[in-house]
Image (cartoon, grey):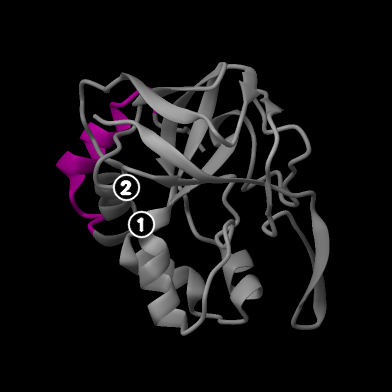
Amino acid sequence: MKKMEIRSMNIGKPIELAFGTKQVTTGIQKKPINKPILLTTLNFNGDGQGDLVHHGGIDKAVCAYPFEHYSYWEEQLGRPLSFGAFGENLTLQGLTEKDLCIGDSFQLGEAVVQVSQPRQPCFKLALLYDRKDMPLLVQNSGYTGFYFRVLQEGMVSPLDELIPLHSHEKAISVAEANRLMHHDKNDLVGIRQLLEVNELSRN
């Protein structure tokens, strides 16, 4: 497993956005930062989520998205995308959902992080792009991104790299987890194997 480069580190506090006739509190609008900040077991200092039931928490402390997918979405959406376009804290280059496995861990600056689950696209992406089908497009593409939990807190710089520490022995990739969660729900053998990974998020 090779290391990953940080293309952008992004944070943002929750804000109110209009969604139809309702106001929705969301932290999906992240902006790049250029200085080191503390990564805790819950999030980066200065970051936040609007819906703490479905986002954030120990198992979803850091949302990451592969930069490799940006060109695909720019073509699909017909527009250029800025870093943080998917509400991610880390825009990463070097490994994607096919390469990363649940339970893989990395050194990230002073911190240590571990892959915990695929990102599950929600309606906030529809709000962000003004497209009701955006969450389903992301889900069907498999280009979902993923979450890290934080095993060790510490300062992280946008200039840091994610250096592999441990590859999980069961080797169930984020892409495989996506397949089982969204496309092949009758694959009971695969689902059983996925659930046997103790490092998989329980929510």
Please say whether residue 117 is one of the residues in the magenta stretch.
Answer: no
Q: Nearer the viewer, residue 91 or 57?
A: 91
> Is 185 covered by the magenta stretch?
yes
Which residue is painted at 38% across and 36% down in the image?
Answer: 4
Residue shown at the point (57%, 50%) measured from the top left: 88
Describe residue 93's horizontal placement relative to residue 31 as left or right. Answer: left
Residue depth check, mark 2 versus mark 1: number of the one nearer the observer? 1
**Of pointers 2 and 1, the one earlier in the residue sequence:** 1
- Rendering coords of residue 65 (x, y %): 46, 50
What residue did someone put label 2 on?
96
Residue stretch rendered in magenta on the structure = 184-199
Local SS, label 2 = loop
**Is residue 155 rendered to the left or right of residue 162?**
right
Circle 1 is placed at which residue position?
68
Q: Secondary structure at mark 1?
A: helix
Which of 168/69 is in front?
A: 69
Instruction: Identify the residue at image location x=62%, y=17%.
Output: 153
Q: Amino acid at mark 2?
A: Thr
Is the Cβ of the residue at disc 2 closer than 8 Å to that at disc 1?
yes
Q: Quadrant of residue 25?
A: bottom right
In-image side of 15 versus 110 (left or right): right
Quadrant of image for the N terminus: top left
Cα gap from disc 2 to disc 1, whole angstroms: 8 Å
Task: Report the disc number at residue 53.
Answer: none
Q: On the image, which quarter does residue 140 sit in?
A: bottom left
Q: Residues within 10 Å of mark 1 (few under 14, many from 20)?
A: some
Q: How many labels sit on residues?
A: 2
Image position of 202 with respect to 85: above or below:
above
